[in-house]
Amino acid sequence: MAQQPQMQAVQPKTHYIKGDMVLFRDVERFWLGLPGHTFVGRVERAWTHVGTGKLLYDLTELSGNRARAGIDPDYIRPLPATDAMHDIDTAPLSEPDTGAMTPAAVAWLRQHLTRDSSTLPAQRA
């Protein structure tokens, strides 16, 4: 008998604060197979539903600056700053060819150089 693959359980973060960047899913659109079910958002507030006692979140959907109210935290995942900044943190600053860097890393470096051309940030190992 073939063994079924084990699925790893993901424990969602249970509390978000105002300003947290998150990925959230419109669960109804997802289960209906409709497009446009996953969004990047910013947490605006947390509140407790009076009838159920469940903690819910109000978010701003960033792609359209649209308010989304009452989002269940089971369908929210954090977007860590380390993931967003990885390309800049690991940019090969010692490389003479900027083609080896992502556009975000090059933009950050150019912006830094125009502000203070006397110092460069220390390269991370």
Image (cartoon, rainbow, N blue to C red):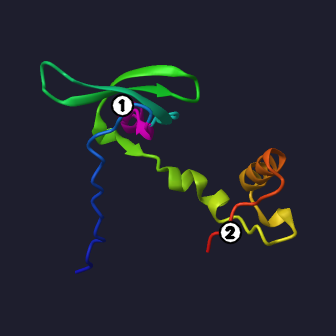
- Between the C-alphas of marks 2 and 1, the distance is 45 Å
66 relative to 76 in the view: left or right: right
Residue 29, compared with residue 112, is above or below; it is above
Number of marks in the rendered image: 2
Q: Quadrant of the C terminus?
A: bottom right
Residue 103, compared with residue 124, is above or below; it is above
Circle nearer the N terminus (2, 1): 1
Could you say which is closer to the camera, residue 99 or residue 63? 99
User: Picture coordinates of residue 57 (x, y %)?
Assistant: 32, 28
Q: Secondary structure at mark 2?
A: loop
Q: Secondary structure at mark 1?
A: helix
Residue 99, compared with residue 58, is above or below; it is below
User: Picture coordinates of residue 58 (x, y %)?
Assistant: 36, 24
Query: What mark, if any, has residue 123 been given in the picture?
Result: 2
Q: For residue 26, what is the image quadrant?
A: top left
Residue at x 30%, y 56% (from the top left corner)? 10
Q: Quadrant of the N terminus?
A: bottom left
Residue at x 84%, y 63% (from the top left corner)? 99
**Label 2 is placed on what type of residue?**
Gln
Give the residue at the far right of this rendering. Answer: 96
Q: For residue 86, what is the image quadrant?
A: bottom right
Where are the magenta residues, as a range?
Answer: 20-32
Q: Are marks 2 and 1 in contact (CB under 8 Å)?
A: no
Residue, disc 1: 28
Give the residue at the far bottom of this rendering. Answer: 1
**Label 1 is placed on what type of residue?**
Glu
User: Picture coordinates of residue 84 (x, y %)?
Assistant: 57, 51
116 relative to 64 in the view: left or right: right
21 relative to 108 in the view: left or right: left
Residue 15, compared with residue 90, is above or below; it is above
